[in-house]
Structure formats: C-alpha cells, structure tokens
Amino acid sequence: MIDIHNHILPIDDGPTDFFQSREMLHNAMNNGITHVFATPHHKNGRFLNPKSDILLKVQELNAYLVGEKLPIHIHPGQEVRIHHDIFSSIDKGEILTLNDGGKYLLLELPSNDFPHNTHEIIYELLLQRIVPIIVHPERNSILLHRPELIFELVQEGALIQITAGSITGSFGKKIRIYTEKLLKHQLVHFVASDAHNCTKRRFLLNEAYKIITKTFGLQRTLTLQTNTEALLHGKPILTAHPVPIKRGIKSFMK
Ligand SMILES: [Fe+2]
C-alpha cells in the first residue's frame, strides 16, 4: 500500500528525531505500507518547510536508514496550507509537488475557515498544470455544514483526500458519518494516514480500507489504491461522476 500524506520527517509536528521516524516507518510497514510520501506542513501558521528543506530531510532520512534494509520507500511531498501568495511561493521554488516534479499538490484548508478566494486559487493552480488534492475536507468545520462546496471543488477539477482515521472513527462519530457520505457521493479520490506518530495519530490505512471494502465493496478499495499508485507512477487518476450532497451534517445525525 502507498500512503500519500503523513508527517514522518522530524521537521514539523510529527516525530522529533530520525529514531522516532524509524519507529513510525516500522508502524507503517506493520500496516502493510510499502511507499510513503513524506509531506510536512508548509505555511500553516506554525511551520515553514520549503521544498529545499524537505528534499534535504528526505535525503538525510534515507541515508540514516541505509543498512536497516527496511522494505519501504520514502518519496518527497508537502502539505501546503492555502495562502494568498501561494503563486509567489511557487515562483520562488518553495512549493513541492508529490514526487518533486509531479503535477499533484497536497493543499490544506484552514480547520475553521473556507477562504473566499479558494475557488480562484484552485482555478489558477489548474491553469498552471498543478492539480490540487484537497486534504481532509471532512475535518473542516465549515465544510461539515456546507458539503456542496466540496462538490464544487471536485467539479472545478480538484481531487479529494480523506484521512484514514476519519473512516475508523478516530475523529468522532460526526466526522465518520460525514466521511461515509463523501465516499457514497463519489467525492473521494484518495485515502491517506496523515500519521504524526505511533500512538494517537498513527497509520490506520489498512483498517480504513477494510471498512471501505465492507461498506462499499472491494472494487471501491481497489480504485482508491490504484489512484495512489497512479500518483507514484505519474498515471491518470480514476474519477467517477460526483453526486452533490444536498444537506450538511446536522441532517445526517438526525
Ligand atoms: Fe497532514
């Protein structure tokens, strides 16, 4: 399995050193993961991790792991918070697409806001041949009540990644039910761990795929997994026709 979003490098709120990174990689392998995209936070108000820093840290971690012969591969990536000067960040070479040079970019919205220029930024990114993958929209408090915005983002050309823990219930019942709705309405293209450690924010990919298989069938899991392989190998992503969700979380919980 391939994990496209996690915090395995010791440069943000994940592990504090390479020893802990190694522990996390063991945890990932136990979860059946063979490839990880290391995707540190950038410009989220707490952390600045421009492309050059991440590439260097991936290189250092790989060097640290030499001799361990772990059957797991680390690829560079970045989780970029949407920000008004994202295009100057791109021009300055600070932004890192998955696999450095690929066209897919992990883009994070703030937890409690939906910036007014989100649609414009996505439109402009697509014009620049960068396909934004919106990470964990199910954990955004505005989108929880306004799922039509996720449908609009997908219609516009963005892709959606949900967190494995949202499916397993790690973030509570409300988010679990909402995530199921997103899957049901064909608004999900990837599942990723967003792992930060080996305890509360660990790799739950295997558990999440098992639930998806049980609820939506094996084919759905295979499609989601095929999409992560496509990211790795630069192949097209499989998309189904999205279906609008008409009502927010309050109506699901009744
Ligand atoms: Fe993350």
Image: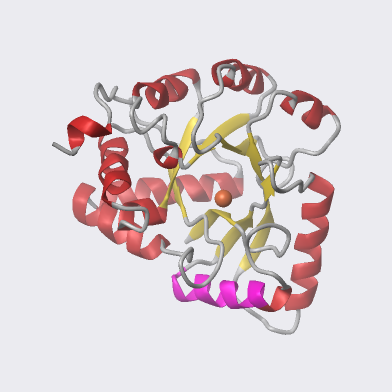
Q: Quadrant of residue 67?
A: bottom right
Residue 90 falls in image quadrant = top right
Q: Is residue 48 left or right of residue 215?
A: right
Please say whether residue 21 is one of the residues in the magenta stretch: yes
**Residue that appears at 65% across and 72% down:** 21
- Residue 30 lies in the magenta-colored region: yes
Position of residue 150 in the picture relative to residue 41 (left or right): left
Task: State the residue in front, 84 or 64.
Answer: 84
Residue 185 placed where, x, y %?
Answer: 28, 32
The residue sitting at 79% across, 61% down in the picture is: 57
Residue 62 screen position, x and y as percent: 75, 69
Residue that extends furthest to the left in the rendered view of this protein: 254
Q: Which residues are magenta?
A: 20-32
Residue 158 placement (x, y as % from top left): 51, 27
Principal SS element in the magenta part?
helix
The C terminus: image quadrant: top left
The location of residue 118, given as percent across then percent down, is 56, 21
